[in-house]
């Protein structure tokens, strides 16, 4: 279940550039919001993927320099830049995966929901263009609040008659990356061995790490469960406060998003063993969207893994019930926004 992006001992011993030798190089990826705090390091990490033949960088400003800079890296993918609404359609033609980190980030004291008013409209505009230009692409939504922006994207795609629930993903990989890191630190485990499924949504208490399902199997005291759960839920705020007004998580987010892109590309390339957590349309609970582990395949979500929700501890079962009203309200807020605009 390890994503190829996680470091593995055998890979670490290889020469760095050997890892970047052209293998397939067949997929095109578009990054919308590419000049931003997440966009730039994410573009660099995607540029390192041997599975990418072309990287389309789109932003409303400052993207030319990012593309010129990145294009000098001697890795296989071609880098193209697209600036402003007039070039949006061209940035999307023929792409296999669209990644959307466009929008404003949090400042200290803000919740992800405080970003709704600005980011909802940005996501709406961008997803409309995706629907018109590359309706078959995998769509990765990073822009917050993910609990609402994913339902907005679904509604826009429905309005355009091209919604495929198997190909729309809210990127929650950072919650898994954080959970793995914090658990490994606390329990003195090798980082590359740890895998914690994180379910629910991507804001505050809607982020529910299922510590009882950690692989390899680890036991935690009640106090450790409480501490770790709260730290994972508030890890984004930890970064927002440390940056003190200069933005939210960008580097760890870029790492997490690159891992999700790489997993999607491996699935598109025919790898039959690709699992990630993601916020997707789901029937696991009574909520229409829910983050859980999914199996990725050539056509997107191949299966939603229900096993993680079975045999929950009392703590997890209570936390699951407790998150549902907030997650439901965020989903409904997104749907209402998109329907009002129609
Ligand atoms: P940033 O402000 O550094 O960059 C955002 C970029 O989006 C800027 O380059 C801006 O020009 C661009 N942009 C704005 N309007 C646009 C439009 N209409 N079309 C295309 N591009 C547009 O922000 P940062 O730090 O990169 O964060 C981006 C988003 O990612 C925020 O909403 C943030 O909350 C979210 N985020 C999500 C995480 C997750 O786990 N899903 C984690 C961290 C941040």
Image (spheres, grey):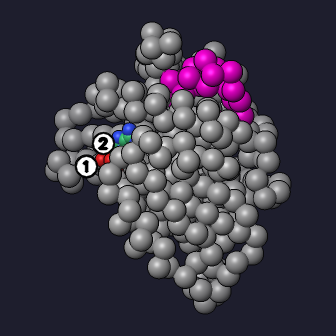
- Is residue 155 shown in magenta? yes
Q: Residue at x 50, y 79 (%)?
A: 73
Principal SS element in the magenta part?
A: helix
Which type of secondary structure does the marked residue at label 1 adopt? loop
Tag 2 near tag 1, CB within 8 Å: yes
Mark nearer the N terminus (2 vs 1): 2
- Is residue 310 shown in magenta? no
What mark, if any, has residue 168 been given in the picture? none
Q: Residue at x 35, y 26 (%)?
A: 116
Image x and y of residue 98, in percent: 58, 46
Image x and y of residue 196, in percent: 58, 49
| Lateral position of residue 242 relative to residue 322, left or right | left
Q: Residue at x 65, y 40 (%)?
A: 134
Image x and y of residue 105, in percent: 30, 42
Q: Residue at x 67, y 49 (%)?
A: 94
> The magenta stretch spans which residues?
150-170
| Lateral position of residue 28 relative to residue 122, left or right | right
Q: CA distance from mark 2 to mark 1?
A: 6 Å
**Residue occupied by mark 1:** 247
Depth check: give the residue in front, 202 or 258: 258
**Residue occupied by mark 2:** 105
**Label 1 CB, ligand 1: below 8 Å?**
yes
**Label 2 CB, ligand 1: below 8 Å?**
yes
């Amino acid at each position: 279940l390890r994503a190829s992006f996680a470091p593995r001992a055998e890979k670490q011993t290889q020469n760095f550039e050997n890892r970047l030798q052209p293998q397939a190089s067949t997929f095109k990826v578009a990054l919308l919001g590419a000049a931003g705090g997440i966009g730039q390091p994410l573009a660099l990490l995607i540029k390192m993927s041997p599975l990418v033949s072309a990287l389309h960088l789109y932003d409303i400003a400052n993207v030319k320099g990012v593309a010129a800079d990145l294009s000098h890296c001697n890795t296989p993918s071609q880098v193209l830049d697209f600036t402003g609404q007039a070039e949006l359609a061209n940035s999307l033609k023929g792409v296999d995966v669209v990644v959307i980190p466009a929008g404003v980030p949090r400042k200290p004291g803000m919740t992800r929901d405080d970003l709704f008013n600005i980011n909802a409209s940005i996501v709406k505009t961008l997803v409309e263009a995706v629907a018109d230009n590359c309706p078959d692409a995998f769509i990765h939504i990073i822009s917050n609040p993910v609990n609402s922006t994913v339902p907005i994207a679904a509604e826009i795609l429905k309005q355009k008659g091209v919604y495929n629930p198997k190909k729309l993903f809210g990127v929650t990989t950072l919650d898994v990356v954080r959970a793995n890191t914090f658990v490994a630190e606390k329990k003195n485990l090798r980082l590359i061995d740890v895998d914690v499924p994180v379910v629910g949504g991507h804001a505050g208490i809607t982020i529910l790490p299922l510590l009882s399902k950690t692989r390899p199997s680890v036991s935690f005291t009640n106090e450790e469960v409480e501490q770790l759960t709260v730290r994972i839920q508030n890890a984004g705020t930890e970064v927002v406060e440390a940056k003190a007004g200069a933005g939210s998580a960008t580097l760890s987010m870029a790492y997490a998003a690159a891992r999700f892109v790489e997993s999607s590309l491996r699935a598109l390339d025919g790898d039959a063993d690709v699992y990630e957590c993601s916020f997707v349309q789901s029937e696991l609970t009574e909520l229409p969207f829910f983050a859980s582990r999914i199996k990725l395949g050539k056509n997107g979500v191949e299966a939603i893994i229900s096993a993680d929700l079975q045999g929950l501890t009392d703590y997890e079962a209570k936390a699951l019930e407790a998150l549902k009203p907030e997650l439901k309200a965020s989903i409904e807020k997104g749907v209402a926004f998109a329907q009002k605009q129609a």
